[in-house]
Amino acid sequence: MHSALDACFSPDVNITIEDSSIKEAVARIPTTGGVVILQSARLETVLIACTSSARAHVCRKLGLEDAASPAPALAELRGLVRRILVVSSSSVFERDLIFLHLARRLAPHTHRAAISRWQAWFAHVDRKAPFPRWTKTALPGWSLTKDVSCDEGTALIGPFRDKHKLTRFTDLLDDLFDLCRFPHILEQAPNGQACAYKEMGKCPAPCDGSETMAVYKERLAQAIAFSREPISAHIDRINDTMRRAAEEQSFEQAKQLKGQLDALGPFSKSEFGGVGELEDFRWLALVRCARKGWIRLWLITPSLAAPICDLDPADRGAVAESLVQVRTFEGRVRMGPISDAAQETIGLVSHHVLLAQSRRTDAFVRLGEHTPTAEELARLMRRAARHKETAEPEADKGGSATFEPGAGEGHNPAHD
């Protein structure tokens, strides 16, 4: 796996401009997508960027589109650049992953700013705490947390695109499982003053001792277990039970089950489609590779992002064998402290998984209790191979050592 990973991150184009004229150098750059790295004579990285056309990107950045009278800044950059590297990739997700890996090493001074758009949010709760409560944690988490781990007492539920959607989800959990909405009152248990939710019958009030903290923590554990499973599985189970109740003319039970379905409705929004416990953050990314019609499989876990193999969807034997490899590698993953690099990968993967279907250019399969069959995987691969990269030309993306900080709210130097 390490050799395959190294191959994905290694430049397949390495041009020294001193050995050829600038026009000859550019002519050797592929017109396909990839990650472009421009370096000085001292091998200092002056620009690293993702792009859907490596040659067009270099021409634009070096002022070669108007070679007769380039802008002063472009002419200066052209005079500085002496080496051009390109890591080719046909996948938007894979290009972002390559950029993340290379920028961490080649452009550490801009790396953090460049990945700011790839931050994902998780609801954190320490089940061993005397008075457990939801808190917001961002991955990569330099702004809120220093160390992130998935030990036995810790639960991290997500990912969410932003902290507002996270709050919406935990509010729904509080309502569904009658959890405490006011943690500062809960911390006074059993001598707290119960809030209005007790009067409304929506909280058993552990704060004033009406319920023990042990029972409250059991209900919290149920909420966490609920979050670990896709909402569609919960809905399917209730629908099956409701159907049997109707067949047996147990109309009162069917009515109660209908109420449960109504309560689950808000959880079925697409923004919560990838939510689970971080320990179960396991995805299979299906991305286009250089060979036409073929697909590369990436296995993604909280501590690992690695290519499994390149496949022809029509080769049923190879597709079936790839699933064996996925299960083998997945079974070797062990949870523990999550490194900075792993947090960054989690944020990037979450960004792509949470994209609207119309904007997603690569396919992602959530692994877990239901691993796709070879036939299902082949069908998804064929669909991914036919998918156009974008409906419109993709904006170049990258991080540059010369970007202007503070260029406005939402500005990201990784997308110039």
Image (cartoon, rainbow, N blue to C red):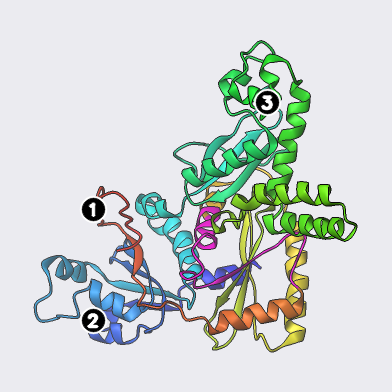
- The numbered mark, 3 or 1, whose residue comes first in the sequence reads 3
Tell me if 348 is positioned left or right of 205 in this view: left
Query: Residue type at mark 3?
Result: Ala
Residue 363 magenta-drawn?
A: yes
As drawn, the label of residue 301 is none
**At 25% across and 69% down in the image, what residue appears?**
81
Task: Provide residue 34's location: percent of width, then percent of height.
Answer: 42, 74
Q: Give the spatial CA distance, label 2 vs label 3.
A: 63 Å
Closer to the eye: label 3 or 1? 3
| Numbered range of the magenta stretch | 345-372
Residue at the limit of the structure toward the right, as seen here? 248
Task: Provide residue 46's location: percent of width, then percent of height.
Answer: 29, 62
Q: Which residue is mark 1?
A: 404
Q: Which residue is mark 2?
A: 22
Residue at the limit of the structure toward the top, as seen here? 191
Q: Give the spatial CA distance, label 1 vs label 2.
A: 27 Å
Closer to the eye: label 1 or 2? 1
Closer to the eye: label 2 or 3? 3
Q: Quadrant of the N terminus?
A: bottom right
As drawn, the label of residue 129 is 3
Res 21 seen here = no
